[in-house]
């Protein structure tokens, strides 16, 4: 048996210099980055030939493919000096056609997959932004002529120059107006308030001393099923309340002794940036069901449409800022696709009667939309009290009022023990602007 022959050693190519190859690669990469070229445009002539061989088949002096039209991007680096390989000796560099899109796209499977994944993510973000963007409400001429023009205003002596606004203009000064609730008779006799009877069927704008509209009692929709809508919404709140787990500060707070949960996008209260209001998993599920409820969607959309009808410029201001914020941060969640407010408060009751307060974190010159819900006599209780305007307003179930809750102290009058009252409020924190 003959002894095994030793394996001949592998010798390095005499012309191979590692430092020179590394330097040439770096220079080619820099040229590629500066010219914004596809990856194969920056290859040396040797490797370009190998790329062509893989795509067209082996090239020969007699079988060179016809050049494609020259590209405006072709600025490949000049070939490196040094001994040419056998394949490059057969083909002059000038005979190589510019690389076309097929080669560029077929250069790397991993690169194609990465690019497609990036495009898919971009498309998904764009779709999410479109889904969360509010449907703009364009007021019709008939709506303006039938509801806004004929409305008779309730005039007050309120001076807008006295509103408690912070120096930034985007939040109000801290609320120091807290107090107990009062009955309508006491407010009229002792505090000198004016009683405003309202059945919820007519529009009543409230103006300041200069005739500027500062709040609106909005006539309910004329569809015949609106009574069913707000009654179902109230019953949904009652059933949801039994499944929620309210923290202690959500049942007893400065606004009153009733259960409340807020949801949506907000800013302030120690937050360093806008974010979604946090809730436990159990409460989050219940709130998601309320936000998906068709009755609350209709109420939210109606309030937003009323906002557009009575204050179109302010409505566009709200819409523009919230849309741009959600475009900037796709993680933020819009409550309703048909509403321009950033957040909402579900006041579950069972006896939602607020104390005198201001919502000082809201936009001072903006409006919030409050919809009254429940089963109570609006002539005996549940009135909305606007303290600085000295108004006591009947607030029937199913009715909506737009008001600047950050700068006007407001409250409700008590209801009887046998009655139930809830409310649904939409608002936007001033910090979001």
Image: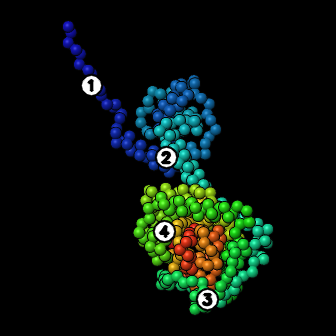
Question: Circle 2 is placed at which residue position?
Answer: 32
Q: Residues within 10 Å of mark 1 (few under 14, many from 20)?
A: few
Q: Nearer the viewer, mark 3 or mark 1?
A: 3
Measured in 3D between alpha carbons, the distance from the residue under mark 2 to the one under mark 4, in whole angstroms, is 63 Å
State the CA–CA distance, disc 3 to disc 1.
109 Å
Work out whether mark 1 precedes mark 4 in sequence or the reverse, and give the earlier one: 1
Instruction: Give the structural element (helix, strand or loop) at label 3.
Output: helix
Q: Quadrant of the N terminus?
A: top left
Mark 2 or mark 4, earlier in chain: 2
Look at mark 4 in the image and give the residue it sits on.
259
Instruction: Say if mark 1 contacts mark 4, CB within 8 Å.
Output: no
Query: SS at mark 1?
Result: loop
Which label sits in the foreground, 2 or 4? 4
Q: Residue at x 65, y 90 (%)?
A: 157
Residue 106's tag is none
Indicate which disc, 4 or 3, sits on the residue closer to the N terminus. Answer: 3
Whole-percent x, y for residue 309 in the image:
71, 70
Q: Is residue 120 visible?
A: yes
- The local secondary structure at tag 2 comes to helix
Asked whether residue 405 appears in the rendered view, the answer is: no
Crowding around mark 4 (Cα neighbors within 10 Å: few <14, some 14 to 19, many 20+) is many
Residue 109 position within the rendered picture, expressed as x and y whole percent measured from the top left? 49, 36
User: Is residue 211 toward the left or the right of residue 141 in the image?
Assistant: left
Q: Which residue is mark 1?
A: 9
Q: Which residue corresponds to mark 3?
A: 188
Q: Residue at x 48, y 64 (%)?
A: 277
28 and 85: which is toward the camera: 28
**C-alpha distance separating marks 4 and 3:** 29 Å
- Identify the image quadrant of the C terminus: bottom right
Q: Residue at x 53, y 59 (%)?
A: 239
């Amino acid at each position: 048996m003959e002894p095994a022959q030793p394996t001949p050693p592998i010798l390095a190519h005499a012309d191979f210099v590692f430092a020179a190859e590394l330097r040439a690669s770096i220079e080619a990469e820099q040229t590629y980055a500066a010219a914004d070229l596809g990856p194969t445009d920056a290859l040396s002539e040797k490797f370009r030939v190998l790329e062509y061989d893989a795509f067209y088949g082996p090239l020969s002096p007699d079988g060179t493919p016809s050049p494609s039209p020259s590209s405006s991007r072709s600025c490949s680096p000049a070939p490196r000096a040094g001994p040419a390989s056998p394949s490059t000796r057969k083909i002059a560099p000038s005979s190589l056609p510019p690389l076309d899109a097929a080669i560029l796209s077929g250069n790397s499977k991993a690169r194609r997959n990465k690019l497609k994944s990036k495009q898919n993510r971009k498309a998904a973000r764009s779709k999410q932004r479109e889904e969360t963007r509010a449907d703009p409400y364009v007021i019709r001429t008939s709506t303006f002529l039938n509801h806004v023009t004929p409305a008779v205003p309730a005039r007050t002596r309120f001076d807008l120059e006295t509103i408690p606004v912070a120096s930034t203009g985007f939040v109000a000064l801290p609320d120091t107006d807290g107090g107990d609730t009062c009955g309508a008779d006491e407010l009229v006799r002792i505090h000198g308030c004016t009683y405003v009877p309202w059945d919820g069927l007519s529009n009543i704008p409230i103006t300041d001393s200069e005739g500027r509209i500062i709040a609106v009692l909005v006539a309910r929709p004329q569809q015949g099923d609106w009574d069913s809508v707000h009654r179902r919404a109230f019953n949904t709140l009652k059933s949801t309340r039994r499944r929620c787990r309210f923290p202690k500060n959500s049942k007893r707070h400065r606004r009153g002794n009733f259960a409340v949960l807020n949801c949506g996008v907000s800013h302030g209260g120690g937050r360093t940036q806008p974010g979604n209001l946090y809730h436990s998993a159990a409460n989050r599920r219940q709130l998601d069901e309320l936000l998906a409820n068709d009755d609350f969607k209709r109420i939210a959309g109606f309030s937003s449409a009323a906002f557009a009808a009575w204050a179109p410029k302010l409505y566009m201001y709200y819409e523009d800022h919230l849309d741009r914020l959600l475009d900037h941060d796709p993680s933020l969640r819009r409550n309703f696709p048909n509403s321009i407010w950033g957040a909402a408060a579900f006041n579950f009751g069972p006896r939602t009667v607020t104390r005198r307060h201001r919502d000082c974190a809201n936009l001072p010159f903006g409006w919030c939309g409050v919809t009254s819900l429940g089963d109570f006599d609006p002539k005996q209780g549940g009135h909305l009290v606007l303290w600085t305007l000295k108004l006591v307003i009947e607030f029937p179930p199913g009715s909506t009022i737009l008001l600047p809750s950050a700068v006007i102290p407001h409250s409700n009058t008590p209801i009887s023990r046998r009655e139930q009252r809830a409310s649904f409020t939409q608002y936007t924190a001033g910090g979001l602007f």
